[in-house]
Image (cartoon, rainbow, N blue to C red):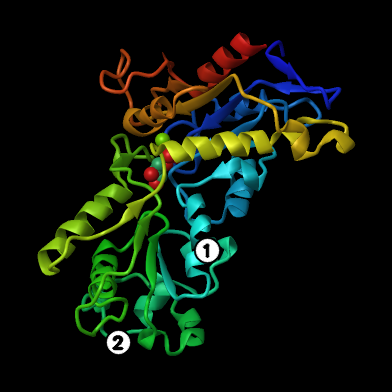
Amino acid sequence: LSSFSHLDSLSQSVPCFGIAFDIDGVILRGHSPIAGSPQALSQLYHHTGSLKVPYVFLTNGGGVPESKRASELSKQLGVNIQPQQVIHGHSPFKQLVNRFEKELIVAVGKGEPADVMTEYGFKNVVSMDEYASCFDSIDPLAQYKNWRVDSQKSSSKNGISSQRVKAAFIVSDPIDWGRDIQVLCDILRTGGLPGTDIAHQPPLYFANDDIDYQAVFPSERLGMAAFRIALESIFNRIHPKPLEYTSFGKPKPFVFQNAEIVLKDLLPLLVHNLKDAKPENFDNHCFKTLYMIGDNPAIDINGARQAGRPWFSILTRTGVFKGKENHAEHPADLVVDTVEEAVDYILKKEC
Ligand code: G3P
Ligand code: MG
């Protein structure tokens, strides 16, 4: 590698560049790798299997703890991915632990939203499935739903229906929009005590604000912002004050600033001599270029552009973006067909 920063404290050198990969529409579609992504990633490792180039997954998706996602991705992509290399839309929720550590919070969405929040350190979390099962008849349509929600866990949650919910977190894409909108309206209108009088709205957090994203189906699927708009429209019709909420995820600049910190924290993994592998040895390290490889112009490219230097945006044609030319409103620094082409470009330029 030619773009190296030689650190005084280290005999080894580490790259002056790093890569952030979007997942849906770049690395995977649904659960399947696409566009040569396993081959592209394998180029970022030495033959011994150790990491050669610092990289992270910077996705607005999620729903499982980062440790679990790292092992799922390792299996899907055939490389050894560390939990710290996975940044989900909901990863910044852990910064709210001090505020809600012991308070009752409700975690909404596909996968294991309560486990995600518990792993972050929240001590009193219930999933929406468990929470809804604590109230008789809270969902008048439940009897018509031919899928079964595992309510066994709720036996350990006695008395939850009389405890005040202090915040609701939309961790991942909600499955049962009808029930979730109903119960969230109940929580949010009553100050966290469904079935009681109108009171001040508790805080509401969304892991991302993606209107759509690329899954397996050829055209884009509705994302978390679509759910947010549905909830907000209904809430604002039935409640005197407009819905208050905070959304995380790309394209917010802090997500890219955090990714830069995480990429820097990976540098000790690239050093072979264990005694040199201390984070403080890289305090002065400065990335010359950080590449964001994404498929969504309004989210990935817009975010990298807003974050500014050292970010360089690469737009692929394997997901939300399918155009021939660059995107008009959010032009990328480079447009390629696939992630494999993007990684080839980066390694040619940097090595
Ligand atoms: O639900 C996932 C979607 O919002 C986007 O995922 O990997 O394209 O940021 P990604
Ligand atoms: Mg994407």
Dot 2 lies on which element? Answer: loop
- For residue 101, above or below residue 342: below
Q: Where is residue 29 drawn, in percent x and y?
A: 44, 37
Mark 2, Cα crowd under 10 Å, few <14 / some 14-19 / many 20+, is: few
In the image, the residue with mark 1 has its CB under 8 Å from the nearest atom of ligand 1: no
Which residue position holds label 2? 136
Q: Where is residue 65 drawn, in percent x and y?
A: 56, 56
- For residue 94, above or below residue 167: above
Question: Amino acid under label 1?
Answer: Val
In this rendered view, identify the residue nearer to me: 190 or 294: 190
- The residue positioned 20% from the left and 56% from the top of the image is 230
In this rendered view, identify the residue nearer to me: 181 or 278: 278
Q: Kindly indicate the quadrant of the structure image that contains residue 328.
A: top left
Give the quadrant of the C terminus: top right
Ligand 2 shows up in which quadrant of the image?
top left
- The residue positioned 45% from the left and 21% from the top of the image is 314
Give the quadrant of the N terminus: top right
Mark 1, Cα crowd under 10 Å, few <14 / some 14-19 / many 20+, is: some
Which residue position holds label 1? 97
Q: Where is residue 327 drawn, in percent x and y?
A: 30, 19
